[in-house]
Structure formats: structure tokens, C-alpha cells
Amino acid sequence: MSPFPVLMEDHWRPEPGEDPDRARLMWFMRVGGYPALAAMAEEARKRLAGLDGLDLVPREWLHVTTLIAGFADEITGDQVQAMTDHARRALAAVARPRITLGRVLYHPRAVMLDAGPAGTLEPVLHAVQEATLAATGREGTLHTSPWTPHITLAYASATRPAGPVIEALGKSIPGGEMAISAISLVSQKPRQTFRWDLIATVPVGPGAAS
């Protein structure tokens, strides 16, 4: 991801060949309920106030996209159950990772917070990859390659210069640490809305399988 894009472009514009009505099942770490992150999102909202061409992500939809399991119409209900059961068992053996928030990342289509340090969340990723493969025969796909865990604060909704956005938000927001305690399987249609339908939530950490 380039730290300083020159232009921002419409995130909601469909990619060529993309069906906006075809939902995908995705593994998300939902983080909107963490007070420290909510405060950071509010600070970003204040700094970006008055700038057009940005859709700020509401608190309840803040997340870390972890893995795209596949199209919802290609994964059966039994496979969903097997996938979540497998993930529950695998994640019971994974210590809850602690991420450090504060560094701002810029992409032509979005403004984000880094969810690092690098490698911290990979045990959770590997567990849901293993679960997806065991249940569906496919490992799933990463949203970005290499995977760069991040929390999107705002999506670009129009083509506009990036400079004023970067100047207003800066390179960091006062932040802190938080532990990831769960990951969720959701169903979401591409580029239509922030929203998704919650399928299941799997705890992370000792005792998660109980």
C-alpha cells in the first residue's frame, strides 16, 4: 500500500466482471466494540470533517478483513457448520493476539489504521484458512496479497486529490493496544454498503472450544 497516493478513487465502483448481488462468506475480526478504537475513529472523524468524497465507516462496522472463504452460493449450510466448528477447535489453542493501533495507512480507495505489529494476527489467519480448507476443500483467498491487516476508517466515494486528506489526518492517531478476542464469519455483497450479515462468531484463546 502506497503511503502517499496522489489521487483517491471511488471505492464503490464495481470491478470489471464483479456481480454486486453475489455475496461472499468472509472472516472478519469485528473491532467496533473496543472503546480505544472507537475513540480513535472519533478523532479521525473530527480531523476529516468538512472533506468531501469520503464515507466514514460507522463504529459498528469497523473490522479487520481476514479471509474470503468463498461465494455464499457455493458453500452449503453443513460446510458453514463444519468450518466454524473446526475454527472453534483450532482457535482454542491460539493465544489472544494484541495489536498496536495508531499508524495511519493510505490507499487510493481508503484511509486505514495499521493492525500490527507484522505477523501478530497470522495465527488467527492460519486457523481460519485451515478451517475453510477442511470444510470446503479450498483455502480461501486473501483480500490483499501479501496480507496487510488493517482497519478501514473511511472509504473514498469519488475521485479527489489525496493531499488534503493526508494533511488533515496525518501519519498517526493517538492509540494503544487491544487484544483480539474473537473472529466472525459474515456474508457480504461487494461494494454496496458497509453492512454484512453475521453468520457466526468464534472466540479466540484458551477455552474457546468449550
Image: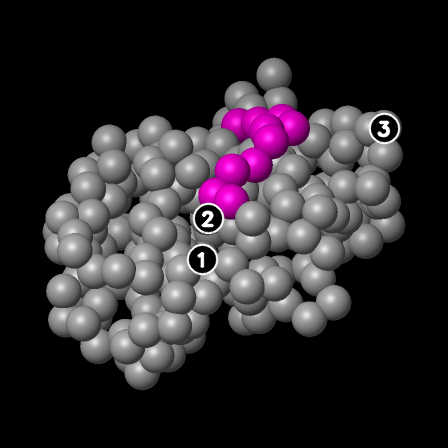
| Mark 3 or mark 2: whose residue is earlier in sequence | 2
Residue marked by disc 1:
149
Amino acid type at circle 1 is Pro
Question: Separation of disc 3 and disc 2 at Cα?
Answer: 26 Å
Q: How crowded is mark 3: few (under 14 residues within 10 Å), some or many (20 or more)?
A: few
Judge whether residue 40 can be spotted in this image.
no
Q: Which residue is drawn at 85% across and 34% down?
A: 76
| Mark 3 or mark 1: whose residue is earlier in sequence | 3
**Is 137 part of what is drawn in magenta?**
no
Q: Residue at x 55, y 64 (%)?
A: 13
- Badges 2 and 1: C-beta atoms under 8 Å apart? yes
Question: Separation of disc 3 and disc 1 at Cα?
Answer: 29 Å
Question: Separation of disc 2 and disc 1 at Cα?
Answer: 6 Å
Residue marked by disc 2:
64
Name the magenta segment's main secondary structure: strand
Amino acid type at circle 2 is Val
Position of the C terminus by quadrant? top right
Q: Residue at x 61, y 52 (%)?
A: 190
Position of the N terminus by quadrant? bottom left
Residue 72 point in image, percent of width and height: 77, 41
Residue marked by disc 3:
78
Task: Quadrant for residue 104, please give it.
Answer: bottom left
Is residue 187 rendered to the left or right of residue 196? right
Q: What stretch is highlighted in magenta?
A: 193-203
Q: How crowded is mark 2: few (under 14 residues within 10 Å), some or many (20 or more)?
A: many
